[in-house]
Amino acid sequence: MTIDNFDFNGHKALVRVDFNVPLDENGNITDDTRIRGALPTLKKILSDGGSAIIMSHMGKPKGKVNAKFSLGQIKDAVSKALDTNVEFAPDCMAAADMAAALKPGQALLLENLRFYPEEEGKPVGIDKEDPAYEAAKKEMKERQKEFSKTLASYGDVYVNDAFGTAHRRHASTAVVADYFGNDHKMLGFLMEKEVKAVDQILKDIRRPFTAIMGGSKVSTKIGIIENLMDKVDNLILCGGMTYTFAKAMGGNVGNSICENDKLQLALDIMAKAKAKGVNLVLGTDCVAADAFSNDANTQVCSVKDIPEGWEGLDAGPETRKLFSDTIRGSKTILWNGPAGVFEFDNFTAGSRAIADAVVEATKNGAFSLVGGGDSVACVNKFGLADEVSYVSTGGGALLEAIEGKILPGVAAVQG
């Protein structure tokens, strides 16, 4: 069943969205990308004459009620975005009456699902090494089923539009789908687009295919780097992981972020790229700073020759040109992770160079997929989100999909 050909008239739709939006200290939303992403699905349900029971998580409250992570803070923003008054249920497990009272065209937002440990389905307060852990895990699985059953009772149709959590087998992203027939569960518009974008990157590759991987640690990206080795022509590794590679090659990286226990891993990646004929592109120079601050003193130096007390915070001019030239000649581009500490305005040049090159390649017919929280924030900061082919809302989910893993949130609906 697809959302496009389903008529929601008279139906109550239980919709899993990803409203895990960043908030400032006053509870104001600083980036509403995820709310905007869910609007086509929610508006289709309401305009068809259906009602929507909206459920999401926010942050990591670890199974306990925490006002800091209350979805009540975003109720007004969701109401404004949907142009209708959205009701709010202060307890996601005690919302049956509110859900039943919904009339066609009305919406109800449930409180943070993760205020209950059953949502994530992990035993609380017990170590994996504890002999009682397996029994606790089994018990939690049963509790998760009951939790899911209660959520499912609020609606007669299930729609999963939360790609950002599709890689987790949580109650609301996967288990709840078991309580709906195949003709009454479907992916939302956003999820459909995300799945299609990943398929295009993996199954419909036009060459050259360039992947740009940023981030501070090689260890967190090793799975995707290894999977991409069999697919890409060019692999650009940038950001903090630059300095692990530089040190592995005998360089001095000063105070730069560096995984000293992953130096051999860096060398293995270089050897693997060479063996597979992949053009591995690493930074050669950087903008180093004498403090982790926007106002620090800076100098451009080789990534292998950073003075003591200094740290690399952005790609240098030579590296920017190297990256840009590679990207501009590409026909398929995946970008995950910035080239420097782009949050500091004085260290955005590397990420901006990548963004500009991706935009230029896209204009020349390349398919470009930008994903992962920091990359998305990056293109949004530069105002370039509309100039790439697709901006993914899923960080971990996107990476796992590209690693070739089955996403529980998709499988639960599509089988």
Image (spheres, grey):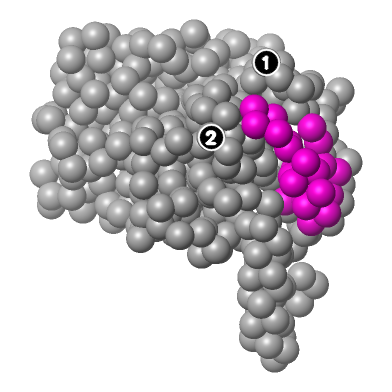
Question: With 20 as the anchor, is 381 left or right in this view?
Answer: left
Q: Where is residue 292 shown, x and y percent of the image?
A: 66, 25
In the image, which residues are magenta?
Answer: 87-113
- How far apart are the alpha carbons under marks 1 and 2? 19 Å
- Residue shown at 36% from the left, 47% from the top: 1
Q: Quadrant of the C terminus?
A: bottom left
Label 2: how many Cα within 10 Å (few below 14, some 14–19, many 20+): some
Out of 272 and 404, give the one closest to the viewer.
Answer: 404
Q: Is residue 287 magenta?
A: no
**Residue 293 visible in the displayed image:** no
Looking at the image, which residue sits at the far bottom? Answer: 131
Q: Amino acid at mark 1?
A: Asp
Residue 302 picture quarter: top left
Q: SS at mark 2?
A: loop
- Residue shown at 53% from the left, 34% from the top: 9
Q: Which residue, given by chain and number where applicable, does mark 1 sit on? A: 83
Q: Would you place residue 208 above or below residue 174 in this image?
A: above
Q: Is residue 89 magenta?
A: yes
Question: With 306 as the anchor, is 26 left or right in this view?
Answer: right
Q: Where is residue 124 shown, x and y percent of the image?
A: 76, 70
Question: With 272 as the anchor, is 128 left or right in this view?
Answer: right
Out of 71 and 68, give the one closest to the viewer.
Answer: 71
Q: Would you place residue 249 above or below residue 350 in this image?
A: below
Q: Where is residue 258 shown, x and y percent of the image?
A: 52, 44
Q: SS at mark 1?
A: loop
Label 1: how many Cα within 10 Å (few below 14, some 14–19, many 20+): few
Mark nearer the viewer, 1 or 2: 2
Q: Which residue, given by chain and number where applicable, does mark 2 sit on? A: 9
**Residue 227 visible in the displayed image:** yes
Q: Amino acid at mark 2?
A: Asn
